[in-house]
Image: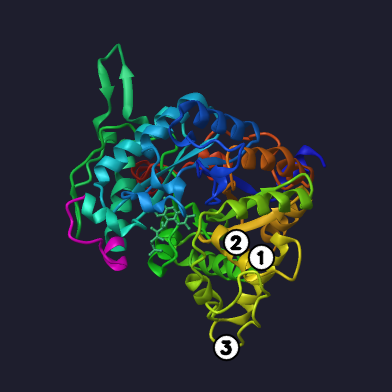
């Protein structure tokens, strides 16, 4: 395949969704796994630099504003981690191409703060920063921010909608050409190109302008990840990419079509928004090697085998069943049987045989409790599935969640990425150096400069 052909072909977008001890709850217990990477700058630097060598689009770390020690057996990576702005500022200094996504919660922040922080990071990274807008998945945050309770979905998104618009306006408050810096005349700025906001809305009153120059990307790309209707609306209005968690391709296709279908009412085209489901690739040199690693991980789960959540998911009470016995007949009514059958099929594929036990189904369920697609297999098996999702309207790329670190990521980069590249599905070189350029998104004009150009063309 020639360079021109590969460039004109639609390309996958791949990013790392960092779980420092791995996505699999027992990932950190493997003998080869790193257990303290979350707080180790050398580890974070080596991961980011390796991603850049593999030509990944971005490095992403999620964030929450509360924690407790009882998260350790299910969500060890989310229990404690670095504050995102601090970490991304460090990674910006030790990388030069990879996109960097910072997560910031609108429910417990002020737009002026977030506009300053994000604009500053975009300067420090030379246009490689994007903002993952979240309204807070952990309700306990309220108790850390002097609030009685976490707001409900409607209030959080009312706040977020106005919040994001204010941040975007603050980013535009200095035009790109505002800085004259003319030593001869002594004019440092052209005041006609600096624009206070005088914003007075339902939630915020912000005078502006921002005390940071317009970010190199003009407007930082936004990402969002909620599943609610309001979150999808926010994504359709503002986001360049949406993270999702789906394990069934039909549901992923419906989500993809649904969100892209909302774009027209905001004057946007489907190509302006990228849908990126999470993917947990458990890679081996062969399918059997990958399954052996999956069995090893399953055996390391710390669990009391509480079958109630799994029973709820499949619509049949597993309480009386022998853990090492066969699965009961699947229900025909309560839950969509197609979804249940597909879940069991995925568990069978992961185990490598059809006659799985209740324990084996539980292992798969526990490994995917956070809702992302787990594929166990050799490089071709995993590349085939990625290609299927990419080419049949389920995904524009993936948020890669390695099951353990760093080996689970290394195997993906060393074995699967070359297969995707050989198939012409993924870049072999960066074509740009900013987050927007990795996604083929143009830098938006400053809104005041655009209005002036329009006025001039009319007069
Ligand atoms: C892949 C993915 C990543 C997410 N990362 C975060 C995160 O870092 N912090 C957070 O508070 N919520 C995160 N969420 C949750 C959503 O952003 C959202 O806040 C949550 O789902 C509640 O909103 P909803 O009611 O709109 O779904 C993530 C969701 C997904 C699917």
Q: Is there a contact, CB below 8 Å, between mark 1 and mark 2?
A: yes
Where is 104 relative to 36, above or below? below
Residue located 31% across and 46% down the image: 167
Secondary structure under tag 1 reads helix
> Which residue is at the front of the view, 459 or 131?
131
Residue extending furthest toward the top: 184
Display coloring: rainbow
Q: Which residue is mark 1?
A: 347
Q: Position of residue 351 (x, y in %)?
A: 71, 61
* Horizontal side of residue 174 vs 100, given as left or right: left
Q: Earlier in the sequence, mark 3 or mark 2?
A: 3
Which quarter of the figure is the N terminus placed in?
top right
Q: CA distance from mark 3 to mark 1?
A: 21 Å
Magenta stretch: give its range. 145-156
Q: Is residue 61 rendered magenta in the image? A: no
Q: CA distance from mark 1 to mark 2?
A: 8 Å
Q: Is there a contact, CB below 8 Å, between mark 3 and mark 1?
A: no
Classed neighbour count for the residue bearing mark 1: other residues with Cα under 10 Å, few (<14), some (14–19), many (≥20)? many
Closer to viewer: mark 1 or mark 2: 2
Where is 278 relative to 186, above or below? below
* Residue 129, image quadrant: top left
Question: Which image quadrant shows ligand 1?
Answer: bottom left
Q: Is residue 151 rendered magenta in the image? A: yes
Secondary structure under tag 3 reads loop
Classed neighbour count for the residue bearing mark 3: other residues with Cα under 10 Å, few (<14), some (14–19), many (≥20)? few
Residue located 30% across and 32% down the image: 212
Q: Is mark 2 within 8 Å of ligand 1?
A: no
Q: Which residue is mark 3?
A: 333
Q: Which residue is mark 2?
A: 363
Number of numbered labels in the structure image: 3
Q: Position of residue 174 (x, y in %)?
A: 31, 35
């Amino acid at each position: 395949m020639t360079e021109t052909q590969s460039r004109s072909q639609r390309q996958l977008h791949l990013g790392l969704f960092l779980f420092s001890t791995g996505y699999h709850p027992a990932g950190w217990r493997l003998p080869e796994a790193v257990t303290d990477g979350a707080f180790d700058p050398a580890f974070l630097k080596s991961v980011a630099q390796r991603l850049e060598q593999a030509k990944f689009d971005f490095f992403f770390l999620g964030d929450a504003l509360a924690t407790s020690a009882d998260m350790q057996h299910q969500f060890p990576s989310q229990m404690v981690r670095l504050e995102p702005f601090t970490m991304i500022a460090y990674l910006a200094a030790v990388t030069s191409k990879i996109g960097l996504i910072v997560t910031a919660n609108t429910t417990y922040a002020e737009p002026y703060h977030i506009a300053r922080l994000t604009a500053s990071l975009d300067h420090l990274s030379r246009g490689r920063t994007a903002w993952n807008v979240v309204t807070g998945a952990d309700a306990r945050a309220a108790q850390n921010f002097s609030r009685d309770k976490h707001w409900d979905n409607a209030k959080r998104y009312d706040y977020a909608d106005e919040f994001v618009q204010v941040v975007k306006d603050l980013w535009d408050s200095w035009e790109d050409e505002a800085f004259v810096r003319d030593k001869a005349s002594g004019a440092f700025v052209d005041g006609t190109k600096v624009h206070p906001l005088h914003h007075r809305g339902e939630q915020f009153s912000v005078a502006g302008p921002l005390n940071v120059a317009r970010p190199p990307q003009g407007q930082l790309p936004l990402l969002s990840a909620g599943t609610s209707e309001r979150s999808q609306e926010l994504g359709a209005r503002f986001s360049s990419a949406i993270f999702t968690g789906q394990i069934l391709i039909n549901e992923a296709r419906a989500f993809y079509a649904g969100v892209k279908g909302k774009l027209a009412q905001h004057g946007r085209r489907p190509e302006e928004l990228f849908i990126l489901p999470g993917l947990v690739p458990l890679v081996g040199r062969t399918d059997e090697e990958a399954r052996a690693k999956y069995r090893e991980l399953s055996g390391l789960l710390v669990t009391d085998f509480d079958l109630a959540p799994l029973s709820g998911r499949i619509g049949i009470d597993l309480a009386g069943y022998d853990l090492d016995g066969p699965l009961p007949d699947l229900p025909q009514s309560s839950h969509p049987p197609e979804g249940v059958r597909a879940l069991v099929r995925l568990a069978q594929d992961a185990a490598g045989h059809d006659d799985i036990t209740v324990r084996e189904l539980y292992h798969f369920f526990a490994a995917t409790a956070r809702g992302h697609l787990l594929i166990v297999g050799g490089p071709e098996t995993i590349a085939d599935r990625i290609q299927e999702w990419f080419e049949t309207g389920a995904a524009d790329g993936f948020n890669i969640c390695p099951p353990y670190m760093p080996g689970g990521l290394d195997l993906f980069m060393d074995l699967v990425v070359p297969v995707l590249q050989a198939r012409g599905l993924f870049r072999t070189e960066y074509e740009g150096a900013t987050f927007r350029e990795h996604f083929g998104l143009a830098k938006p004009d400053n809104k005041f400069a655009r209005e002036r150009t329009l006025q001039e063309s009319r007069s």
